[in-house]
Image (tube, grey):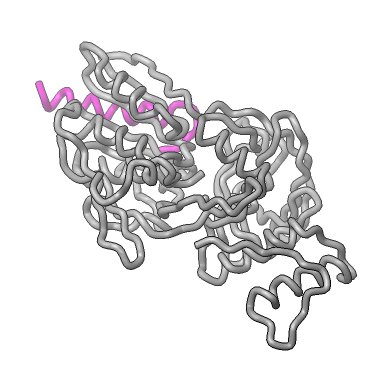
């Protein structure tokens, strides 16, 4: 992977979201105040004298969110020490959340998809709901990533979520549940087809997929990326490489830098592949699906994907806190940008029952018939 230091690449997390720190010095003022002085003083005044109380931490998060909105970064967010620790847990393969995907809808944050049978759906939340409050905090001015962090917390804790739906306001209590996102599961199906389910690209996912692809006597593969919110770029590239015989996987574009293309080594499987996608397929999962679709290595079955393939890096800002910042975008091998657009499946299928799997099997059956 030319042009990027391995330690840097490992820190790039595509999906699960320049450093500025606000200090607080009570009573600080100056007639020739610098920009930093103005921000520090405003923070102190609002915290001490505002009619509506707010903590220093809340004001810092709001200030950073405002900066991210100014540069139109819906995926950027400020993470306090607790949120940053949860981010690391998610990257390692486990977190506690409500099973919902969010997206920026103008100045609002709305629910883009919910996990079937997950906490959000059980509580009555639905696609299209605009999230207005999480716990006691209003979401006005926050990015989608920042709201997502508020929804994540310790396992088996309850979070109050207020949403606007049509002309009404709905407040629900949702029980956060632990989710093991990193476990790749493999199921042999009829006719030698191997179904590989990748819930998230956490550490080790690529290696697990490669092991599944090496299954003896396999005739084809169903790579299930439905509901996969992304994860580590290197794991996504490794997964796509398992089905490619060399060539480009994805190109990284960053402001002021020469584009860098990640390529697959030779020797990947040449057996037919169907990739299952839906509205919850995002980030690194879209990179994998887009690479296999563009390279003519897979048929995409399901629904249009989420549309988030931004290059994000995490910057420590002290005290265990961090900022996730979008620093560029990813392009598919054909030069198409996924972010804000998504991938269109070759064959539309619903997530009801096993409709998508059955359609995938039909596609693979056609490949087998052609080969014979």
Q: Position of residue 281 (x, y in %)?
A: 44, 42
Magenta span covers which residues? Answer: 349-372
Residue at left 26%, top 58%?
259
Asked which quadrant contains residue 350, the reply is top left
Residue at left 43%, top 30%?
203
Residue 147 higher or lower than 284, as above or below: below
Is residue 370 magenta-colored? yes
**Is 320 left, or right, of 71 in this rendering?**
right
**Is 363 left, or right, of 357 in this rendering?**
left
Q: Position of residue 322 (x, y in %)?
A: 58, 51
Q: Nearer the viewer, residue 15 or 110?
A: 15
Q: Nearer the viewer, residue 372 or 318?
A: 318
Q: Report the quarter where the N terminus lies.
A: top left
Residue at left 76%, top 33%?
157
Q: Position of residue 302 (x, y in %)?
A: 39, 39
Is any part of residue 285 visible from this angle? Answer: no
Q: Report the quarter where the C terminus lies.
A: top left
Residue located farthest toward the bottom when viewing the structure as drawn: 31
């Amino acid at each position: 992977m030319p042009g990027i230091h391995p330690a840097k690449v490992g820190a790039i997390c595509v999906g699960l979201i320049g450093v500025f720190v606000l200090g607080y010095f009570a009573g600080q003022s100056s007639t020739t105040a610098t920009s930093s002085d103005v921000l520090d003083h405003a923070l102190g005044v609002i915290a001490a004298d505002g009619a509506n109380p707010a903590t220093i931490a809340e004001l810092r998060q709001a200030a950073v969110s405002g900066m991210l909105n100014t540069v139109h970064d819906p995926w950027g967010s400020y993470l306090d020490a607790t949120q940053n620790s949860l981010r690391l847990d998610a990257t390692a393969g486990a977190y506690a959340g409500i099973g919902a995907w969010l997206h920026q809808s103008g100045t609002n944050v709305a629910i883009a998809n919910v996990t079937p049978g997950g906490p959000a759906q059980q509580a009555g939340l639905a696609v299209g709901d605009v999230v207005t409050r999480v716990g006691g905090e209003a979401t006005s001015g926050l990015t989608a990533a920042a709201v997502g962090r508020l929804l994540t917390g310790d396992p088996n804790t309850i979070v109050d979520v207020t949403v606007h739906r049509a002309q009404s306001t709905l407040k629900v209590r949702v029980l956060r549940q632990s989710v093991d996102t990193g476990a790749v599961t493999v199921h042999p199906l009829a006719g030698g087809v191997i179904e590989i389910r990748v819930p998230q690209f956490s550490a080790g996912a690529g290696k697990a997929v490669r092991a599944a692809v090496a299954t003896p006597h396999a005739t084809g593969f169903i790579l299930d990326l439905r509901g996969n919110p992304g994860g580590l770029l290197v794991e996504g590239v490794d997964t796509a490489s398992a089905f490619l015989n060399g060539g480009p996987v994805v190109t990284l574009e960053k402001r002021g830098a020469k584009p860098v293309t990640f390529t697959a080594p030779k020797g990947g499987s040449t057996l037919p592949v169907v990739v299952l996608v839906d509205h919850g397929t995002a980030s690194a999962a879209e990179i994998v699906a887009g690479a296999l679709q563009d390279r003519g290595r897979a048929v995409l079955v399901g629904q249009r994907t989420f549309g988030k393939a931004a290059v994000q890096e995490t910057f420590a800002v002290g005290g265990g806190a961090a900022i996730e910042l979008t620093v560029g975008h990813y392009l598919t091998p054909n030069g198409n940008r996924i972010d804000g657009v998504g991938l269109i499946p070759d064959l539309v299928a619903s997530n009801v029952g096993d409709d998508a799997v059955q359609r995938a099997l039909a596609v693979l059956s056609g490949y087998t018939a052609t080969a014979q």
